[in-house]
Amino acid sequence: MVKSMTGFGRASGVYADEHFAIEVVSVNHRFLECAIRLPGPWAVLEPALKEHLKGRLSRGKLNVSVRRERGAAGRPAIKCDLKVAEEYVAASRGLVNLMNSTERLSLDTLARLEGVFYQEEEEHDIEQVLAAVTATLDQACDHLETMRKREGEALAADLRERVNEMRAAVAEVETQIPALSEQYENRLRERMGELAQDTSLTQERIALEVAMMADKTAVNEEIVRLKAHLDHTEQLLERPEPIGRELNFVSQEIQREVNTLGSKMRDIGVTREVLRMKSELEKLREQAQNIE
């Protein structure tokens, strides 16, 4: 099944009567890149969560946000370190005596100094936290996958339309080949007649010229390979695993054959169909960048 690389998923979880929410946003990227924002005490979970995501997704730039929605029971305790406060007061008195000043350290200023007030987090079993966060992350990824699959279906339908358009262009070129081959054959006979009149040319040189002209006008191999690549593209769209990288490679092969076809058959009708194929191929390659 074709999946897009863009999507959004959200899920909520509970740990120790404390609610938290996880949001996952995915956009296009050549590889899998994860950025995870975690609450301070849970920051140690980042490597394990990134490793877990590798088992769920293969491509895309992911932004994962884990937000704690703490109630009264989950809020950190506010503590005052009286010893640190006493040291600040004693140091300020020494400075007052040194400067022979009458100023005093106010309570408001003391409360703002680093280390006087601090938050004390409750000790958590990090393994239990990881289990709860991972389970909720899977739920968010499930929602993300649903959106990516839905967008992937639309992308696959569009890609099939591009392939059908290119097939129609190839079929039109094939209908023109017999008439064009006859024209090339007549030109070849004329050229052979001109070469035969040149007494300075050997039979080997004439044979080489004929072979070169024949090779320049033969496009059967290109047509066969082009059809094979279009078949391969449609087969990829039916695969369950990620196809983005392989689809990009196949599109390059299609472009190579289309370019060769255009360079060999310099006919206005064929050129029109070649341009049509190039236009559809460009649309296909652009859409392929969105596929996992």
Image: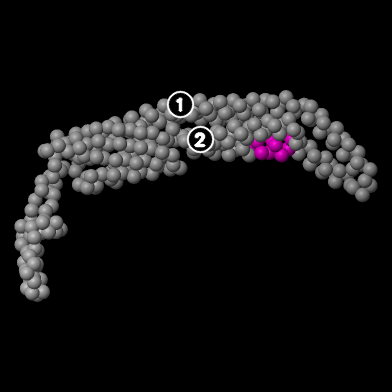
Residue 71 percent location from the top left of the image? 14, 37
Query: Does residue 235 appear in this view?
Result: no
Query: Does residue 195 appear in this view?
Result: yes
Dot 1 corresponds to which residue? 153
Task: Determine if the magenta segment contains residue 101.
Answer: no
What's under tag 2, amino acid-wise? Ala
Please tell me whether residue 65 is drawn above or below residue 114 in the rendered image.
above
Please tell me whether residue 171 is drawn above or below residue 91 in the rendered image.
above
Label 1 secondary element: helix
Q: Is the magenta stretch mostly helix, strand or loop?
A: helix
Asked which quadrant contains residue 165, the reply is top right
Dot 2 corresponds to which residue? 288
Instruction: Residue at 74%, 27% (x, y): give it.
Output: 176
Between 99 and 38, the residue placed more toward the observer is 99
Instruction: Residue at 67%, 25% (x, y): give it.
Output: 171
Which residue range is magenta in the image?
257-265
Q: In this view, does 111 lie to the left or right of 173?
A: left
Q: CB under 8 Å between callouts 1 and 2?
A: no
Residue 123 percent location from the top left of the image? 13, 45
Q: Is residue 280 left or right of residue 36?
A: right
Residue 254 percent location from the top left of the image? 61, 35
Instruction: Residue at 75%, 33% (x, y): give it.
Output: 267
Please tell me whether residue 94 is drawn above or below residue 276 in the rendered image.
below
What's under tag 1, amino acid-wise? Glu
Asked which quadrant contains residue 112, the reply is bottom left
Instruction: Residue at 79%, 30% (x, y): give it.
Output: 181
